[in-house]
Image (cartoon, coloured by chain):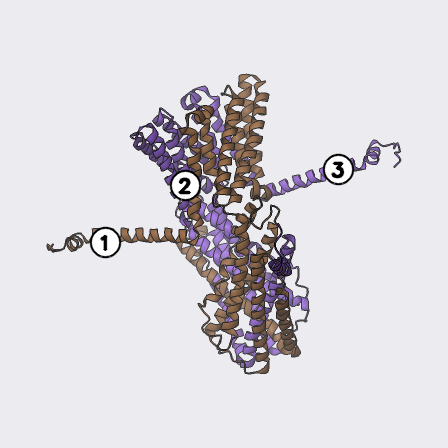
Chain colours: A brown, B purple
Amino acid sequence: MDIEQGNDGKIALSEKWPRLSQFFAKVKSTIIGFLEKIKKIAMDDPRRIAHAMKVGLALTIISTLYYVTPLYDGFGESSMWAVLTVVVVMEYTAGGTLSKGLNRTFATVVAGSLGVGAHQIAALCGEKGEAILLALFVFLLAASATFSRFIPEVKARYDYGVTIFILTFSLVAVSSYRANELIQMAHQRISTIAIGVATCLCVSLFVFPVWAGEDLHKMVASNLDKLANFLEGMETECFGEKSNFESLEGKPFLQVHKSVLNSKTTEDSLCNFAKWEPCHGDFSFRHPWKQYQKVGGLIRQCAASMDALSSYLTTFSKTKPIFKADTELLLEIQTACSEMSSESAKALRELSSAIRSMTIPSLAKCHLLAATSAADNLRTALSNDITVWETIHVAMVASLLAELVNYTKEIASSVDELAELALFKSTDSVNSALVKPKIK
Amino acid sequence: MDIEQGNDGKIALSEKWPRLSQFFAKVKSTIIGFLEKIKKIAMDDPRRIAHAMKVGLALTIISTLYYVTPLYDGFGESSMWAVLTVVVVMEYTAGGTLSKGLNRTFATVVAGSLGVGAHQIAALCGEKGEAILLALFVFLLAASATFSRFIPEVKARYDYGVTIFILTFSLVAVSSYRANELIQMAHQRISTIAIGVATCLCVSLFVFPVWAGEDLHKMVASNLDKLANFLEGMETECFGEKSNFESLEGKPFLQVHKSVLNSKTTEDSLCNFAKWEPCHGDFSFRHPWKQYQKVGGLIRQCAASMDALSSYLTTFSKTKPIFKADTELLLEIQTACSEMSSESAKALRELSSAIRSMTIPSLAKCHLLAATSAADNLRTALSNDITVWETIHVAMVASLLAELVNYTKEIASSVDELAELALFKSTDSVNSALVKPKIK
């Protein structure tokens, strides 16, 4: 390779060290990609930036415990607990912060008192007995509290509280063996934890609060809208004037329900946090949050049915039999389908807007009545000819089964891939291993 | 009410204070119910008891730092950090403990060094300037680290590490303002945290270890078995000799796939933990855990299709049209269905047992070939009569749509319930509110 002296320094660099310049270009594109990702995350929900600033703010406030001399003299080393509390208690939603803050405070007070009690009992047994008894107490309490975390109700609402319970009890019980002024220490710690929790709650509830309840409310309404979008797409793309069943693959309306399918985890945690929130906006303290979970569950079931329909339509449009309503029966079915999808879509939109505006959904019933009567008419039309009726039913089961066969095939090929990646033994070598002596 | 003196003391009590005896009976049944629940949780997975004991054991071991005088003299108050580490780092699976332990250690070291660096810079600016500069550093670092938790990749693997990073940096930076021997303090803390993590790891990895990877492996295999159960049920109950489509409601085989549908969260977290685990049993360190997620995703899709089929069959069996293969076409469809379900079930069983024994699934392909050819034959048979073929397709879409109408109805009635519980305004009163002046 001959090195030429270029007029432009940049060209010279890229010619001189092509790898180096490639490296810099790669670094640059990685950084730009990363920044764009960050920007997208921030733009998707600007409250995320606010949350980051709020955590910074709460920590800065709490660190004044160190900077202001009279405060520090009051709490001393225990100031640390306030910082620790702020870091672990601050959550994205107000309900999350409340849940963790109250769990922490309550668990600390209960476990602290129990710890002091354990110390009093153990102290009666002399120095050696004390250590043994304390160790026994710690073992028993930690083991039983840990086991309680496997109870689903405890896990859902008090998991963090149980951790803090174990932590506080162990710390108080164990350090009581060394500390001389146990009560004063416990008092200092509880005060600093209370200060930390109070700071978090103030920042979380009063500075641009993010309400888990409001998010849950909006999420359910927007999921209803997604279902309506699917049905509206069905109406225009499949039963509208210019519609045909061809080329449905990749149409966006067939994907719109997918995000609903995996909404359970988010919904459950929002509901769990919403229960802790005080009244805000249109929501009272005892707002029926559980009912949102119920609605959400039904929405997911509906989305699962849409998934079946969507994958059927995609397979169907691939084989490309042009859909023409050339017999009377077909025309009848098509009209009924169009009616069912448009009326159901209207009902879902009505339900969604009723939730948003918190008014009683009165029009949804009319739309559903129309949709149901279309379904009934269809059933009557189809069941007139008993052979067609039966054939349709059985063919329907057969077609769904054929879909299962396809999925099974996909599963089989991904398991094959796994077998290859994980170096599964072939059955032959297993058989021969049974014959040959094993060599290790 | 007249009080009679009974011969039996017990009878006398229940007669004298009927409420009190009712209360005791209720307490008794509550306690028995609770104990039975606990017993069930423990029997479902006895490793849970082992885990609870392991946490107790780790805490007892670490508390010797307090009891043994020479150890305590070495670490002093910092011993607390070892206890704290054990409580928060011990997780159910070995991978979980490793993930948290390594996150904690690494984040502590990095943030501790940064904190010392921040202190050195701030110390150059005089006492007042130091406090302001430290507060600024804490704000900036806490805000940006908190924001980084919204990046999905960070959230999935390093969430705990980021928390500890913020915590350690804040504690070191802020307490450096007061502490005189910062380096010694940092050293003590890091050592105690390391001791805590090491204790957790030893207990978690060497005392009855629970491997997330092994659980994931078994879970995928057992989910495949559940799908096979569903198809085997189809074969016997719907296409077998004594089968009919009546009274399918409530049959257990139609419910067996349900638990698969919600397995995503568990699977994701097991996979995440499995990646941290060292080689164990038949699993190497770089075992392709991601592939299990891929297989799992396909399994869930298949289960969703089963859900559609299952709800179709349930609705169908309610209307009770007796299924008799009285035409040639129907007989053909039925035979194909029987073939498809039994062969797919066999393929799935083969895949599941191949995963369990970690051998290459060789027989699955033959079964799938048989299932696919049955599906193809069916398609040919149906498409011979173009009108029947088209009617079936359109009726299928119609029937799936009718199912959606049913779900929409259910959603509507649960939203009505919500409107009632949450005291939604009726639209009339909204209209009249626009006319009338609002009274608050």
**Is the residue at mark 1 from the same chain as the one at mark 2?**
no
Residue A21: give x, y in percent of width and height. Answer: 21, 52
Determine whether, in the image, residue B278 is placed left or right of residue A275: left
What is the x, y in percent for residue B275?
Answer: 42, 46
Q: Residue at x 45, y 26 (%)?
A: A71
Which chain is mark 3 on? B
Mark 1 → mark 2, Cα distance in angstroms: 32 Å
Residue topped by disc 3:
B23
Q: Amino acid at mark 2?
A: Val
Q: Chain of mark 1?
A: A
Badge 1: few (under 14), some or many (20 or more) residues near its Cα, within 10 Å?
A: few
Above or below residue A89? Residue A372 is below
Distance from Cα at disc 3 to Cα at disc 1: 80 Å
Quarter of the image with the C terminus of chain A in it: top left
Question: What residue occupies the far top of the structure in this picture?
Answer: A126
Confirm whether residue A414 shows in the render.
Answer: yes
Q: Amino acid at mark 1?
A: Gln
Determine whether the residue tagged by mark 3 lies in a helix, strand or loop.
Answer: helix
Q: Secondary structure at mark 2?
A: helix
Q: Position of residue A113 (x, y in %)?
A: 58, 27
Category of crowding for the residue at label 3, using alpha-carbon neighbours closer than 10 angstroms: few (below 14), some (14–19), many (at least 20)? few
Q: Amino acid at mark 3?
A: Phe
Q: Residue A54, located in which quarter of the rendered image?
A: top left
* Numbered circle sitting on residue B352: none
Badge 1 marks a residue whose secondary structure is helix
A154 lies above or below A132: below
Q: Which residue is mark 2?
A: B162
Kindly identify which residue carries mark 1. Answer: A22
- Which of A271 and B308 lies nearest the eye of the viewer? A271
Q: CA distance from mark 3 to mark 2?
A: 50 Å
The answer to which quarter of the image holds residue B407 is bottom right
Quadrant in the picture for residue B161: top left
